[in-house]
Amino acid sequence: MSQPPQPLSTETATNRIRLTEVLVGRLARLTFNTNLAEDRFFLILSVFIGLFSGLAVVCFRVAIDWSRIALMGPLPHPSAIRIIGAPSAVGLLVAVLVVHVFPEVRGSGVNQTKAALYIFNGYIPFKNAIGKFLCSSLAIGSGQSLGPEDPSLQIGASLASALGRRLELSREKLRLLAPVGAAAGLAAAFNAPISAVLFVIEEVIGRWSAGILGSVVLSAISSVVVMRWFLGADALFRVPVTAFTHPGELIAYAVLGIAGAFAAVAFSKSIGFFRPRLRAMPRSTQYLQPAIAGFFIGLIGWFGAPQVMGAGYDFIDQAMHDQFGWKFLAILAGLKILATTLSFVSGTPGGMFAPTLFIGAMMGGAVGGIERHFFPLLTVSTGTYALVGMGVLFAAFLRAPMTSVFMVLEVSGNYSIVVPVIVANTVAYVLSRTLQPVPIFDVLTRQDGLVLPSLEEQREEEILRVEDAMKPPVTLILNGAGSVGDAALRTRELREHSFLVQMAPSGWSVIQRELLDRMMKEGKGELTLSSVLPIERLPYLYPDLPLDAALRCVNQSDIIPVVNRADARVLEGIVTREDVLSRYQADSVAD
Amino acid sequence: MNLPAPTLARRTPLVLAALVATTIVGFALVSRLVTRLKANEKQIAFHAFEAGMAAYKGNDPDRALDDFRAALSYDRDNPTYQLSLARALRDTGRLDEAEAYLVHLWEGSPQDSTINLALARLAARRHSVDDALRYYHSAIYGLWPADPDRNRRQTRFELIDFLLQQKAFAQAQAELIGLTEVLPPEAAAHLEVAARFRQAGDLRAALGQYELALRFDQKNSAGWKGAGDAAFQLGHYSSATKYLRKAIELSPEDDTAHQQLATAQLVLKTDPFLRRISDAERNRRLVSAFRLAGDRLIACAAQTKIDLPDVSGRSSRPGSSATVTGNTLPDLWLRWNAAHGSLRKLSSASNADMPDTLMDLVSQIEQQTVQQCGQPTGADLALLLIARDRDGVDQ
């Protein structure tokens, strides 16, 4: 039976109030007060960077739309004056802005963000964000063959960098903020957070880093949420119903991969060839280059291919729904390569993401159309080839194979075509690497006089491991429980200077011949080895560890045991400082 | 750890508050900006949509497509524009893209009858009966923005027409039966249903619908004619005569009705198995029919240059022979001659099966001569119809 509640004594009530005050105080400190660790603060900051980048990208998209309506007119068939005049005139204006006010906003922005991370400690001037926003929105809106994704990436990175500097973050964190902002910007522009995260890891950070992954993901998701809040959750394309039914069709997709590799190499080489030559021309020509590029793109548009103007997402959508014949698709792919090369090498700020997808979709559709023409039994629609083609060119041109696969899956929301996508992208990636060893972003970076790390290089880098420098186990292993006298006797005939001692219950130590001799002279031969050796155990290594790990401990002893991962008492071999250094020397000679 | 700065640690709540405040201000400003842009774009989209509708109605679907696409590029989520574009795409044969738009719309509101109807029409264009049935039914039982009863009826009519086109007569009849339950009390609707029942091959139901239509509109000549025709096809010549007379009364210039009425009257005069006629009259009609059939056989043989054998069973042409059990014109001729001698015994009570035997022969002659010499007219046509109806009854 329940007791009726009894009134609290004054002392109990006071104690409870104190306890509550203490708890609330601790909670408040934990939450808001000064004890927020920098890492936690960095995560929270990543969310805000995502929100701000999302807002900035929404504004950027609005600016592009407005400039397109103002420059090209709202109707689907603009007049000749608009279609040729707008990109030419805007090219001139953008050139003036780039030459005099925003010299660092040329090109896509991916390289600049990467350079900020690796060279400038995460510093990207806020002016770059403004310049990129202004120039890119005008250029894309006027019909220059460029996309909004890479500029969004740079705007996000620039915002993040500015915020980090304003908050006086440490140099280490400031450096990491650039990719966090970049992922946010790209995710919002492309409405695909997974692809954005992977792209930033593959192309901006250039290496897998678990430490930053959480922040990058948080910022990407936050920005996508903001973008969808304002502009809706619709995907960029309405993907047709696709399915992979017959394994034999993988051959057709492999052919698509081959075609994609050649298209990517042509695109990449044309940019790599013309860009430095145009930049080397006299400064006065810099004013005219974007205008001339705009003029030629306008001409292409006027003479029957307005699809190549601007980002071209609507036309990718139409290509995916079999709206064009394969011949026209092939022409569009070729013209887009030409138009994008013109826009990009002229120094007009804008991205290569959208043109890459456009070329890939058109080329994919064309290849699919040709294949279906000759092999009518192929069941897949041309639209599916266009979809896979986007990923193919992404893998072959931007050299982001993982991003390319996830991008197609994320955009299509269809996992049934994952096998064709992987097959086509792998073929395209491998062939493209063979034909053009240096990826386009690295080409651009090197043309700018910078050398930055890339994930592709890292993947190809041969990593030296402990097993590469390891020698077979020594013949004599002493037991820690054995006596000094016994050890001296057993080692008398041997030439080695140091001997490994297996300690009980586990661990390793080392004893030198001098110590054994001295102990014998002092009459301490009855003592056990473990009693005369230091308590601290030797560090040990595993065979699969990078050789760098051995460098950290070779100074602690002249012999380092290499043991089995399953049982640390089982000796796999030994390494010495000389072994490690000679292995590195041999490697550098081979290089 | 490399702390950002002691100042940051001290300022954290302030920094967070500032960030939250900035976010709120940012959202407000961007919201205003986007609202303005969207309002502007909606206006542009509406103009493009109107231009598209004008082009669509003006039978310029390609121009309409461009305009609808432009409208959608400014107002992506607008279901009306999407639906219009999907319809234009469907009408220009771009079925895949049309389907992509419609499926997208359908996912948003699967109960919307307009979308389901568009999808049904798309499936119908692809001759996909199962999908069409599914979407048509969803349209019929879904939500209509206005006048749901009429729209549901129209949709079911459309479904029935599609099924008839696909020769899925059983499914069409099932839908028609469903439709009869919801028909409004007006002649036109029953006439439409009756016409489709006839197409589906259910003449009895068709006649019922014509009769219902005539209850609502006694002056509907199409109704009388339809009823007359259905009754005629069913072999109800007496009713057919009644309906056709009424139809001719209302539309005297209708030649078909006149011919059909004449034939029906001839059948009624010729049919020896008509109820409520005397034995003498029946025998007279039998003899008359028998002779008519003989005449038709001789005329047809002459027309097709087939040599008929003499009564002994031998052909006048060398090498030709005939068996008396077959159904060729010479065989029938031999049988006709053999039966001719027994006509005198027709009134005898011991020959009860004889009328049937004679009429069977008449039927076979008429059917065989149709195959050899084409459709008869007049009394021969009446005999052919009587033969057909007897076969139907037998079956």
Image (spheres, coloured by chain):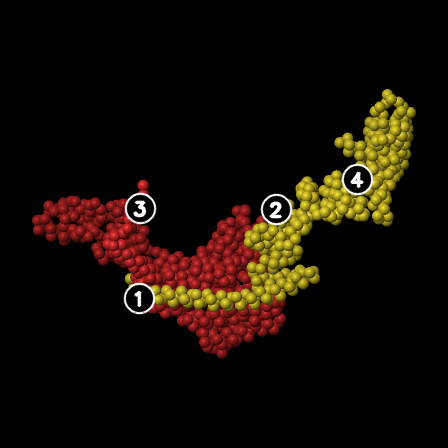
Chain colours: A red, B yellow
- Tell me if mark 4 has few (under 14), some (14-19) or many (20+) residues whose alpha carbon lies within 10 angstroms of its own: many
- Checking the image for residue B10, the label placed there is 1
Q: What secondary structure is found at the residue carrying circle 2? A: helix
Quarter of image, res B22: bottom left
Q: Earlier in the sequence, mark 2 or mark 1?
A: 1
| Mark 3, residue position | A4
- Tell me if mark 2 has few (under 14), some (14-19) or many (20+) residues whose alpha carbon lies within 10 angstroms of its own: some
Q: What secondary structure is found at the residue carrying circle 1? A: helix
- The three-letter amino acid code for the residue at tag 3 is Pro
Residue at the limit of the structure toward the top, as seen here: B350
Q: Mark 2 near mark 4, Cβ–Cβ under 8 Å?
A: no
- The three-letter amino acid code for the residue at tag 2 is Arg
In the rendered image, residue A200, in percent from the top left (x then y), is placed at: 42, 61
Of labels 1 and 3, the one closer to you: 3
Compared to B246, does A206 lie above or below?
A: below
| Mark 2, residue position | B134
Query: Disc 1 to disc 4, how far (Cα)?
Result: 99 Å
Q: Chain of mark 1?
A: B
